[in-house]
Amino acid sequence: MFTGRIQIEKASAYLHFVKNGMVQSLLHYLKYRNKDQIGIYLGKMAGKDLAKDNFFEGLNHIIPIPLHPKKLKLRKYNQAEKIAFGLAETSGVQMETQLLLRSKFNETQTRKSRFNRWLNVEAIFTIDPEIRGEFKGKHLLLVDDVVTTGSTLEAAAILLEKELQCKISIFTIAIA
């Protein structure tokens, strides 16, 4: 999915997202029904499986894709952060939530075309200038709930690679 667009060290999606399927139901409960423990549980489950394949070897930090503060206030938690928390618990890799910031409020990607998804995420992330130096040259694992076109993860990865000269790996609970 990311070949030729960004350099990814490692990538994994734990489950396959099918419209009206069980994974969609789980993720809808996680995102829209205040069932944050689903994210932690799925992160731990995936983390245990990924650890068997040494997926976490060489990683310095786990970075959940952030929500904009307005969306975070509405949802009350970041579902990617809950997944990342479960991964961090099982892997021993530290989760970092302050480095990557969502500076632009954008509408949901759910019903957008591939091109419109890319336009919707253009320049939506920034890096906290006060802590950026701690992450230069590190190997970061970006975590999100679902990857459809990869535009959100790509936007974050491009910024981190450019600004921090770091290695990027990706994990999502599901791929659509």
Image: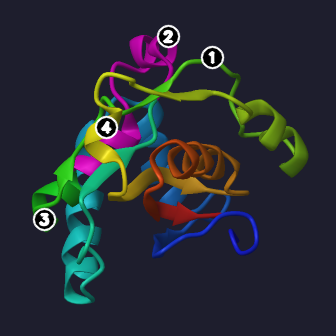
Residue 112: x and y in percent read 83, 40
Instruction: Determine whether 174 is above or below 29 in the image.
Output: below
- Which circle, 4 or 1, is nearer the viewer? 4
Q: Amino acid at mark 4?
A: Gly
* Residue 137 part of the magenta segment: no
Question: Circle 4 sits on which residue?
Answer: 133
- The front one of 36 and 137 is 137
Q: Residues within 10 Å of mark 4 (few under 14, many from 20)?
A: few
Q: Which residue is mark 2?
A: 70
- In the image, taking residue 24 as reference, residue 81 lies left or right, namely left
Asked whether residue 74 is drawn in magenta, I would say: yes
**Residue behind mark 3:** 90
> Which stretch appears magenta?
67-85
Q: CA distance from mark 3 to mark 4?
A: 27 Å
Q: Nearer the viewer, residue 103 or 70?
A: 103
Q: Are the residues tagged 1 and 2 within 8 Å (C-beta)?
A: yes
- Image side of residue 37 versus residue 151, left or right: left
* SS category of the residue bearing label 4: helix
